[in-house]
Amino acid sequence: MKEENLVEMGIPVIDALIPIGIPRNSFIMIIGESGTGKTALMLHLLYARLKRREPCIYICFDDSPNAVVQQLSSFGWCPTKYIEANLLHFIDCFSYRAKQSNTLPYVTFIENSQGYYSMLTDIIASSFERFTLHDCQGAIFLDSLTEFLTQVDLAKGIEAIKTWRAEFSKSRNILCFGTFHIGIKPLEGVEEMLEYIMDGIIDCRFEPNFMREGVLLKQLRIRKLKGAPHRSRWVFFTITRRGVTSVDVKTIKY
């Protein structure tokens, strides 16, 4: 029987690499280039927590809450069911760009990105107040840390991420997941700082040998995971109607 502070990720291709689960007080970063499956992985991780009736907050920097709901629905995961059960809440840091506000009860709308990082910690905490939240429950999803850091002063943005890890992951045992897109010139050097901060890192990439042949096959690996044994080998995965699933590379024809 697993210890209470260890949990499965809920995605078989990842859980196979983490034999006893991850510490619940972890902040995990999913890192990779564009198109390597980071957001699909985030959405599947979100669904895995919702299936366990854990309250979740999804912080939208790259897209609107409506778009995230549509993506969840495309996998057949019925997000409306979890919204109505008061298990899923969004913080919308995106829609201000289109000069749109959002009055939906399951969305907290951020009117202006300028300086909001200074109050986002309080907004996340107050959003959790709408849930009947106990220790060892709940998860926060930040999609993406890249977009967040392009909107704010870098030093203050990194300090905010450190605060979220301390206040939510470590103090409240709330799992935190964030995506980070590599190759953005203004953020060169930031990746190393975030890697140092994080408890775990999941790398996503296109397999190099297949890519040279013009075939884009996705791979992931657990590069870092504090507090739990893990296998760091690259494994193939694909995105299907059921979300992130493993793929047998021997069946690939090109």
Image (cartoon, rainbow, N blue to C red):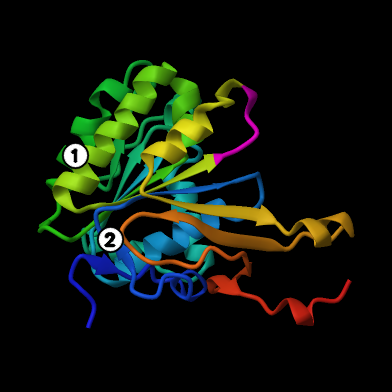
Image location (x, y in percent) of residue 117: 32, 24
Magenta residue check for 40: no
Q: Mark 1 sits on what residue?
A: 167
Which of 129/192 is in front? 192
Which of 59/103 is in front? 59
Which of 2/13 is in front? 2
N-terminal label among 1 and 2: 2
Image location (x, y in percent) of residue 165: 27, 40
The image quadrant that residue 123 belongs to is top left
Image location (x, y in percent) of residue 247: 66, 76
Q: Is residue 112 visible in this depiction of the protein?
A: no
Vertical side of 216 occupied by 185: above or below: above
Amino acid type indicated by mark 2: Pro
Amino acid type indicated by mark 1: Glu
Image location (x, y in percent) of residue 118: 27, 21
Residue at point 44%, 30% (across, down): 148
Comparing labels 1 and 2, the label whose residue is closer to the camera: 2
Question: Cβ–Cβ below 8 Å for labels 1 and 2?
Answer: no
Left or right of 178 on screen, residue 108: left
Residue at point 24%, 47% (across, down): 169
Residue at point 46%, 22% (across, down): 151
Is disc 1 placed on a helix, strand or loop? helix
Q: Main secondary structure of the magenta part?
A: loop
Vertical side of 211 occupied by 11: above or below: below
Local packing at callout 1 (Cα closer than 10 Å; few below 14, some 14-19, many 20+) is some
The range drawn in magenta is 181-185
Q: Quadrant of the C terminus?
A: bottom right
The image quadrant that residue 158 belongs to is top left
Could you tell me how far apart the alpha carbons at marks 1 and 2 are, in whole angstroms? 16 Å
Magenta residue check for 183: yes
